[in-house]
Image (cartoon, grey):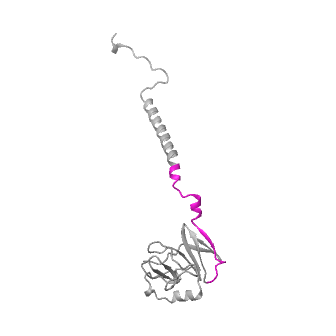
Amino acid sequence: MAQSEMPHAAAPPGSDDGHGGARRRDFLKLVTGSFAVVGVGAIVWPFIHSMNPSRDVLALSTTEVDLAPIAVGQAVTVVWRGKPVFVRHRTPEEIRVARATSLSELKDPQPDQARVIRDPWLVMVGICTHLGCVPLGQKVTDPRGEFGGWFCPCHGSHYDTSGRIRKGPAPTNLVVPPYAFTSDTQIRIG
């Protein structure tokens, strides 16, 4: 008997009739692909999560400052996000001089009232806007420049009692960070 003349044997039970195999193959591809995606996610997630800031860095995102011990005319330096922040309890005379200054005299015109939330407190990032030095003027014995505020000896920038640039190469005023009063004697920076 020739091969074409041989009778076809019946397919064993549970075998493929031609259509079920394609469905089974598609299902296996879907399951395999799903496991691959989950596996890649499980491997990549710890790497991505490691790029988030650590708890100690997040804790530094805000700084609380107690204003009660700061006497009139005194200044303190606190650290916020690794930067020095100057907090000065200004005298009535320092406030008067800052507010009497004409905006036309300023390199970076900004009224004193726009730089403070509540008198007599002035809060600024203590980094010179020229090359990132830390200006002098926080201690009573520090030189405060020609305008009674802060002086950056590196390149000669002079800031007034509102932290505004008055003389020297610095292009802008000392930056006022985001802060808020949480009570009459407490502020939160950041």
Quadrant location of the N terminus? top left
Name the residue at 44% across, 18% down: 10
> Looking at the image, is 109 positioned above or below residue 84?
below
Based on the picture, tell me whether residue 70 belongs to the magenta stretch: yes
Q: How many marks?
A: 0
Tell me where residue 98 appears, x and y as whole percent. 52, 86
Can residue 190 be seen?
no
Left or right of 2 on screen, residue 79? right
Nearer to me, 73 or 25:
73
Quarter of the image where one finds residue 86? bottom right
Nearer to me, 4 or 112:
112
Tell me where residue 187 appears, x and y as whole percent. 61, 74
Quadrant location of the C terminus? bottom right
Tell me where residue 85 appears, x and y as whole percent. 55, 73
Name the residue at 59% across, 58% down: 55
- What segment carries the magenta color? 46-72
> Looking at the image, is 49 positioned above or below residue 125?
above
Based on the picture, tell me whether residue 21 belongs to the magenta stretch: no
Nearer to me, 136 or 36:
136
Can residue 92 be seen?
yes
Name the residue at 45% across, 80% down: 156
Quarter of the image where one finds residue 81? bottom right
